[in-house]
Image: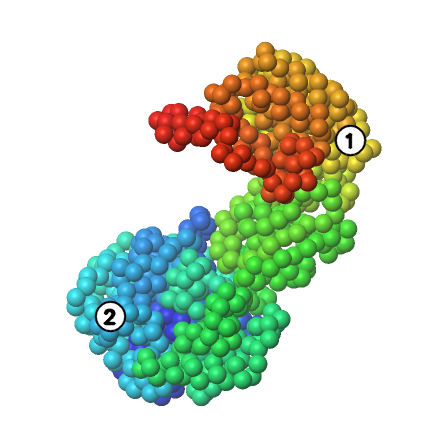
Amino acid sequence: MISYFGVRHHGPGSTASLVAALDQLRPSVVLVEGPSDATGLLPLLADRAMRPPVALLGYAADDPRRAAFWPFAEFSPEYQAVRWALRNDVPVELIDLPVLAQLDDAAPAEAETEDGTAGPGEPDRPGSQPDDRRDPISALAAAAGYEDPESWWNDLIEQNPAPGPIFAAVGNAMAEYRNHTTTDEHDLRREAHMRRAIAQAAKNADGPVAVVCGALHVPALAAKHTAAADRALLTGLPRRSASITWAPWTNARLAYASGYGAGVSAPGWNQHLWQTRGRADVATRWLARIAAELRQAEHLVSTASLIEAERLAVALAALRDRPQPGFEELREAAVSCLFGGDPVLWNLVADRLLVGTQVGTIPEGVPLAPLIDDLQRQQRLTRLRPEALPRELALDLRTDSGAARSVLLHRLRILGVGWGQLTDAGRSRGTFRERWVLAWDPTFAIDLVDKLVYGSTVEQAAAGLLAEQLGEATTLGALATGCEQAMTAGLPTAVSVALRLLADKAALSSDAADMLGAIPPLVDVLRYGQARRTDAQALGSLVEHLVVEASLSLHYAARPADADASDVLVGLVVGVDRAIRLLDEAVSAGLATVWDTGLAAVVGDDQTSPKVAGCAAQLRYASGALAAADVVLLVQRRLSPGTRAVVAAAFLEGFFTQAAERLIYDADLRDAVSQWLTDLDEDEFVAALPLLRRVFADLGASDRTRLLAAALGAGARRAVGVRLAGDGGAGWERQLAVVARLLTAPTGGADRG
């Protein structure tokens, strides 16, 4: 006898009903939808150290980027079916197409379950999204008068206290649905493979056979098909085997919001339903969890409010003709009674409640891809536990623990594993601290598997990949960035390669922009040398060489260029200046002198880009190399009546864009700019307005007020505001005419202002 149990992937109601049905049937073999070549890994689910959510990871050994996951949560019916079989010493098999057949056969859009989402029986491919085109649950919910298919399923299965012969009813509903839809070739092949496996198992079984599969497949598996027809559908299956292992999974990857449609909009809620199955206090315990999260966030929650919230949730469920409150009713009740009607507070706890932070664990000794195995070992050594939701991590690189954690995170970044995102790199003189934001995503396993070609440990793979990238680098900037990565990741071999390539290319380079782009990352390496406990002295002469060569050629590079090229060069010049100023004084003193010589050459050369010259003058002024009186003379000369307005405006932009606040305190500088603006004719002034907006964009409201007061004089500072003439005055009439002309001018004229 063959019994078919059509389930909803990751549905705790399906799971509870399934376990009860298996206890009653006592099958002699359990067949579960899933890649058949992974059957040998199922006994590991009985290991106490294996804690879901976990996933089968299957990939092509010759191309690890071709990979897929089959996830299992504790409340997944497939997981509990396997656990039931192992607990009762009953054979259990997976019966779906093998991994490579599914990878070859199914497009991402076709890898969706009967509820429109991927589940344990079907692979989750990185980047795949839910597809509603094959969602029978929505169709059945609409037929029952429900707008939300999740609510329909929850009422019928998940929270129905007396579901009755639910599997037969679900099978009949799916048969009716399939009578009105078409089935793609991929599903036909999968069902043919499962039918053959079921027939073989039934032939060898000495008792009932239990088949656990997605509900949509039940009608096709139970229907009569000839063996010849099934064999014809399965011709051409790949004969080579895939590499398969277990990988940790997360609740966040089970949620719709993660980009992986596993049919679970709130895995934390599903976990709660599973853990409280059969209890009468499901709502009470959920509200208690909400209260605990709020109190942990230092919000007061009274017991009376909790009682009122539960009463409201029960009333809402009754009004909606539901058997008991769902998480929608409980959420609405909590917002009303616990959050004062403010949904913003609910958002503070929603992720932890509805999604959760659970990350599965894999027992030691489980055969893993070498890089995954090494990463787990490094995580244990550094005591960095993977968590699904983002959390901040501050590291002190002077400690062994902080240095080890930093090195691991930097190596993973080289490998393209974005577990940690650095949030404050290069923002200050501090070189002994780092701040990270950590968030684990199970698809990082594929990123590691894909890098096996570079080495079997995280260190070897990072060094191998970085060495390859350094060999392909074509600019000094790319080589310098690679050198910095090698240093911060503790990869001495890659550092040596980078230094050798940098020295060779620097000796031949005459491109000022290329040299300027290389200096900041190399200076960062020098700054980090002591913190990383790495000898970076070999970099000193290289940095000095680049600074000298870049300084000598800077004024040539700054000669006539278009606006975009000038903007790029300004960015490079500012970056180098900031890098040199951040170095220790003992190291930077000589470099700063050389660099100032290059800036002075740019300022003194009338053929250089006025914007770059203005930037160079401001940097010299900020460093003290240019006295205040000399700055005023320089600005007066650059803004003299004989200078074209567009040239003067570019110099002004380069000088003041990041230093507009100096106009507040330096009266002579302010007077020079005011005089230039006063001397402009009307058209030139209108053309300069966009420039002035950019110059003062970084000033806050208070600084703008202070600048206005300084420009209008001491009397204005004592006055409440500017006193207007009773009739507006002739000056205002002229300004009104200009504004009117701008507003009514054709597009070209309006754009100019």
Return the residue nearer the eye: 313 or 736. Answer: 736
As displayed, is residue 162 above or below residue 455? below
Q: Secondary structure at mark 2?
A: helix
Residue 564 visible within the image: no
Left or right: residue 636 compared with residue 644 = right
Left or right? Give the position of 2 relative to 253.
left
Give residue 150's position: percent from left, percent from top: 34, 71
What residue type is disc 1 on? Ser
Quadrant in which the N terminus appears:
bottom left
Q: Nearer the viewer, residue 44 or 379?
A: 379
Q: Residues within 10 Å of mark 1 (few under 14, many from 20)?
A: some
Residue 588: mark in rendering? 1
Q: Nearer the viewer, residue 686 or 585?
A: 686
Residue 217, above or below 409: below
Seen in the picture, residue 628 relative to 218 is either above or below; the reply is: above
Residue corresponding to mark 2: 142
Look at the numbered discs 2 and 1 and tell me whether their residues touch, using CB distance below 8 Å.
no
Toward which corner of the image does residue 599 lie, by quadrant?
A: top right
Residue 587, placed above or below residue 57? above
User: Dot 2: few (<14), some (14–19), or many (≥20) neighbours within 10 Å?
Assistant: some
First in sequence: mark 2 vs mark 1: 2
Q: Quadrant of residue 36?
A: bottom left
Q: Identify the secondary structure beneath mark 1.
A: helix
- Is residue 604 in sight in this rendering? yes
Q: How far, Cα to Cα, is label 2 from label 1? A: 72 Å
Q: Quadrant of the C terminus?
A: top left
- The amino acid type of the residue labelled 2 equals Ala
Residue drawn at x 49%, y 33% is 728
Mark number, residue 312: none
